[in-house]
Image: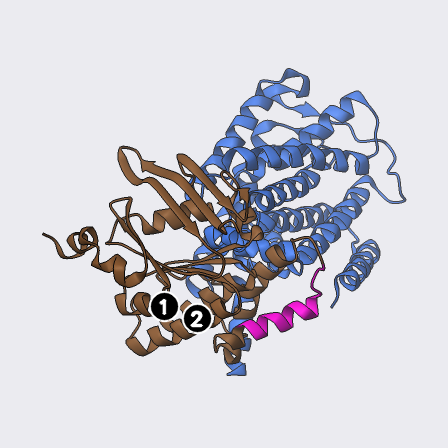
Amino acid sequence: MGTAKFWGVSFLVAAALLVLTRAFFANEYFFFAGYVVLQYIVLSTAWNILGGYTGYTNFGVGAFFAVGAYSSVVLHKLTSLPVPVMIVVGGLMSGILGFGMGYLTLRLKGVFFAIATLALAIVAQTFIVNWDYVGGSRGVYVIRPQQAPLYGSYIQYLFSLMLMLGWVSVAIARTIERSRLGLGFNAIRDDELAAEAGGVPTLRLKLISTTLSGALMGMAGAPLPYYVTYLDPASSFNLSYAVNSVAMPLIGGMTSWIGPVIGAVLLGTIQQLATVTISSALNLLIVGVLLIAFVIIAPNGIVGLVQARRRARLR
Amino acid sequence: MPPLLEVCGLGKRFGGFVALESIDLNVETGERLGLIGPNGSGKSTLVNCLCGALHHDSGNITFDGRPIDGLPSYRRTRLGLARSFQLPRPFRSLNLVDNLRIPLLYTVNARPGARLSDGAIGERCLALLDDVGLADKATRLPRDLTQVEMRKLELARAVASAPRLLFADEAMAGLSPSEVEEILVVLVRLNEQGITIVLIEHIMRAVMSFSTRLVVLVAGQKIADGAPQEAIRNPEVERAYLGE
């Protein structure tokens, strides 16, 4: 399928989902739960652009996500912009953060890069904790507008926005995958020195990757204040965002755009079910158990499993 | 005509260790230059400095009449300076065609002038693989290749960037005599197609039959430069290789 066609088809899928959910989700709660799953589709797809395609592990997901969320808080206090504009601004802010992180840390490789991103998250959190205007460590209340801009409730509105964001990020990931850019990313992941010797401007490509990945994470975080209505650093910078965003592509498969989507839908849904039926504290345990299982059974994720099966059949 | 590559007083140190000391070297267009020296004499460091993987501390490098000191590696490749690695470094997750597609997309298509279409790139990849006898493995992954095939892929990838000067860094180390012969045939053919080649090699038989000129490095210094037969009879070279 060509890139343009994919954008079209995936848009139709997203639109169909939108209509179907409006028709069949009888309870508001489903929109709350669906929002989280969609948010993880965006986060894990964004993570995979840097982590899966380019081969740099980012544990600072929380920082990018929270910067998006807090930029919305600031905008909320200063202006009365519509949420889609806030999403764009949040993406810009996190994109800038991603660019900065890339420039400062991309000389580091492997585990050292991962540690640096973790440190970045802590630095960003410390900054927010000490910034009184956005509530500091005691957090901030964000009152939703009375009326949702489209018909339906406000949570349905946020759900629709996240659905569109999911569509955009998946389509971007797929576009990159099939492009010259994606091939360059893969070359960097496999062997940076050889990539450079093959004419790949590695620094520039890595900066594109960190910026894009960060921007999408920030966009996922931007509607968060309106979703939770109370935002505090401890929950918005939570490490579980990073753990989940890493685990989902790992479980789904990191080489293809569909991997993070599968991982996010699978893991996100299980977590939501567990939260309702058992306890929310169980979530990280589920992630841990699944990760161990997949590392042993299918180290290349579900997509890897399917590809290996297909290759074996061809021989 | 000025030399294709002109190296003047090149120096490189790692902490207190002097890896290269004031190397002067000219490579003429169309030449087949052999570069030899005992282990640790600085051959690979020299290649790394010339190709931009390392930055030299002193001296100047001029390629095709323009200074390239400080240019990043990828820019040098785009100017026409390619290398193969001592230990093959294929892109492990990409099949052979995609391995070659990287230099075609990022080097050949990044140069001014006509851009190749996707179809033309695909054909070119296959033609390049065919040149080194790997056409039937085009869609396989590098892990399916044997050692000699890996070396050929390494060469094909370097050649895919359509270089004017190719550094073949120990392209034959660890191969059997008949495999060495295979690689030599490929290298000579590339040279006949107009690519200047610098061969860094330990296997003397291969170097002597391939080179039109020989440069000998010992402990970071150039101690001989000339016709192969004369260079190896140089007393300093004999001392370095055979001892007192």
- Chain ID at mark 1: B
Instruction: Please report the bounds of the magenta region as a residue range.
Output: B114-128
Residue drawn at (61%, 55%) of the image: B106
Asked if the residue at tag 2 contacts the one at tag 1, i.e. Cβ–Cβ closer than 8 Å, the answer is yes
The vertical placement of B136 against B227, above or below, is below
Picture mark count: 2
| Side of B27 relative to B208 (left or right) | right
**Disc nearer the start of the sequence (1/2):** 2
> Which is the main secondary structure of the residues drawn in magenta?
helix
Residue B35, position as x, y percentages in the image: 33, 56
Residue B126 among magenta residues: yes
Assess disc 2: are there few (<14), some (14-19) or many (≥20) residues with their C-alpha within 10 Å of its C-alpha.
some
| Side of B177 relative to B138 (left or right) | left
Instruction: Indicate the colour of chain A.
Output: blue
Q: Which residue is mark 2?
A: B188
Mark sitting on residue A303: none
Residue A18, position as x, y percentages in the image: 81, 54
The answer to whether residue B58 shows anywhere in this view is: yes
The vertical placement of B215 against A9, above or below, is above
Name the residue type under label 1: Phe
Q: Which residue is mark 1?
A: B210
Residue B190 among magenta residues: no
Residue drawn at (74%, 51%) of the image: A168
Name the residue type under label 2: Val
Residue B10 in which image quadrant: top left
Chain that is brown in the image: B
| Side of A6 relative to A245 (left or right) | right
